[in-house]
Amino acid sequence: MRIAHIFSRFKTYSGAEHLCFRWLREGIRYGDRLTVITRYLPSELVDHVPDDVNVRTLRWAHVPTRYHFLESICDVLYSPFLFFLVPNDTDVDVYWNDNTLASLFLDSLVRRKPRVFYCLQLPHFAYGQTGLVTRSYPPLSWLVPLLVPMYRWLDRLFARRADSIVAISKMVSQDCRRVYRRSVVPTAGPGIDLPRAGIIGPLFIRRTLPVKTDQVLLTAGKLIPKKNFDMFVRVVHMLRRDGLDVTGVIIGDGPLRERILGLIRSLDLEGYCLMTGFVEAYDDVLRLMSGATIYVYLERNVPFGLTPLEAGSVGVPTVTFAGGGVEETIVDGENGCKLPIEYGAEEVAAAVGALLTGPPEELARLGRNGQVHAKRWTWDRSYDRFRKHVASVAAANPRSILRMACNSWVLSDSSSAIPLLSMTLHFSSWSALNASAEHSVVGIPWPGSPAVYPSLPGPNKSMARVGVSIRCNWHLLAV
């Protein structure tokens, strides 16, 4: 099967990027012909792309900066240009998340072939977390409340042009059905990389970091507001205030790094709340996790909840909030503890403290169950679910036999130089139609120019081609 993956921007080998890279590997194993279209692929991530995958990038796009919110806006602005890189001969095109939907919409105007929108989460700044985002990245983010109504309208308009929407989890599937008014939104979640032999052990974290205590709380992720790393720091502070000798470790980097460091200093936690920065090697992430006593995951309504699975794979139980994607990855009392979503730092600290002061056998039992549970989330099963959905969409939406090819921008008259968009109707298999119809042109002129021009099979001295080839979808223009 020929599949194109349209992915706005690759940043690090984590999260959605990790998922995409692993699916590319599984797709090659299946024998699929794969193409990746993206605004930017860092040189350090090129080795994660299988050799047989064709990669197309916007070579003229700027190199992303460290300004998270600004680059998120740029992802959306670059999206329409990704459309020009999508191959014509794929069986199905997969658009990853909302920041590629403008490209999906354009593709729906000009090509008649199946399109899948793979939704990792709804754009949180537009649905439910507008206030949080507005406060987090001033002054540019102060414009968010003004942009939300238009963005919601465009988001729904563009998403409805997809032939199918596939969600990363049951929670995201419910959101998509509600927002995009779909009766069916299947799910295809990620797998996890199970630890290799020799990865698990408590010594690596103590050799790597200046950990002074027997008990370690660990959390990981991009340092952005919704991850609630400030709450994690306060939980560590409250536990130490109550006499528990613990160290907190934060794995990850992001725009809130300095703010979190400032909170650590203000609470006098230097030496007892440690930040590793971004850890490039995935094995090292698992090594650090395996040295923790408890993994603390404080994002609310998370789309999936992958890191609790990864913690479980190295035998570390998780404390997290109920709801969202963790409903699929954490079983309360079996491989972790789920707390009411309205809990604050005080209640989280109390729950974590109860586990730390409880019988060691209970933590060990939760850790063993986590390892068993993690083995169910394999990459071959993950990609197999995704591929079945994609194949069913391709089978149910064959290519249309009526297609419109917008050949060029045409100068209608050498003296007036008025642009005209010429569209040639191609009838590939309608035997009842005369073959000469292939040479007819329907003109969409600018004001003042003639409506229809004859298309000549050879060079036309009165017309000059001055643009790139574009394709248009007949049935949409007829609506």
Image (cartoon, rainbow, N blue to C red):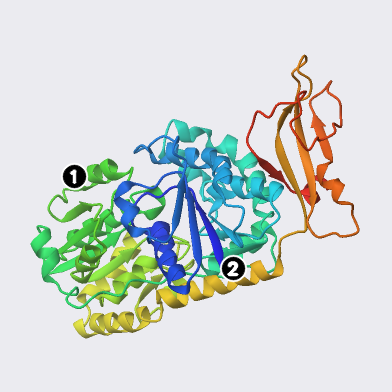
Residue 271 position within the rendered picture, expressed as x and y whole percent measured from the top left: 12, 53
User: Which residue occupies the foreground of this view, 417 or 246?
Assistant: 417
Residue 57 position within the rendered picture, expressed as x and y whole percent measured from the top left: 45, 45
Q: Is residue 184 above or below residue 417?
A: below
Q: Dot 2: few (<14), some (14–19), or many (≥20) neighbours within 10 Å?
A: many
| The disc label shown at residue 265, or none | 1
Sequence-wise, the earlier of marks 1 and 2 is: 1
Residue annotated with mark 2 = 390
Q: Dot 1: few (<14), some (14–19), or many (≥20) neighbours within 10 Å?
A: few
User: Which residue occupies the foreground of this view, 147 or 42?
Assistant: 42
Residue at screen point 20% across, 78% down: 197
Residue 409 position within the rendered picture, expressed as x and y whole percent measured from the top left: 70, 31
Q: Residue furthest front?
A: 458
* Marks 1/2: CA–CA distance: 50 Å
- Direction from residue 180 to residue 283 in the image, left or right: left
Residue 60 position within the rendered picture, expressed as x and y whole percent measured from the top left: 45, 34
Asked which secondary structure carries label 2, the reply is: helix
Quadrant of the image for the N terminus? bottom right
User: Which residue occupies the foreground of this view, 471 or 40?
Assistant: 471
Asked which secondary structure carries label 1, the reply is: helix
Residue at screen point 79% across, 20% down: 413
Circles 1 and 2: CB atoms closer than 8 Å: no
Q: Is residue 462 above or below residue 318?
A: above
User: Looking at the picture, which amino acid does disc 1 mark?
Assistant: Arg
- Direction from residue 68 to residue 276 in the image, left or right: left
Q: Is residue 382 above or below residue 400?
A: below
**Quarter where residue 468 is shown:** top right
Viewer can see residue 286: yes
Viewer can see residue 333: no
- Direction from residue 31 to residue 295 in the image, left or right: left
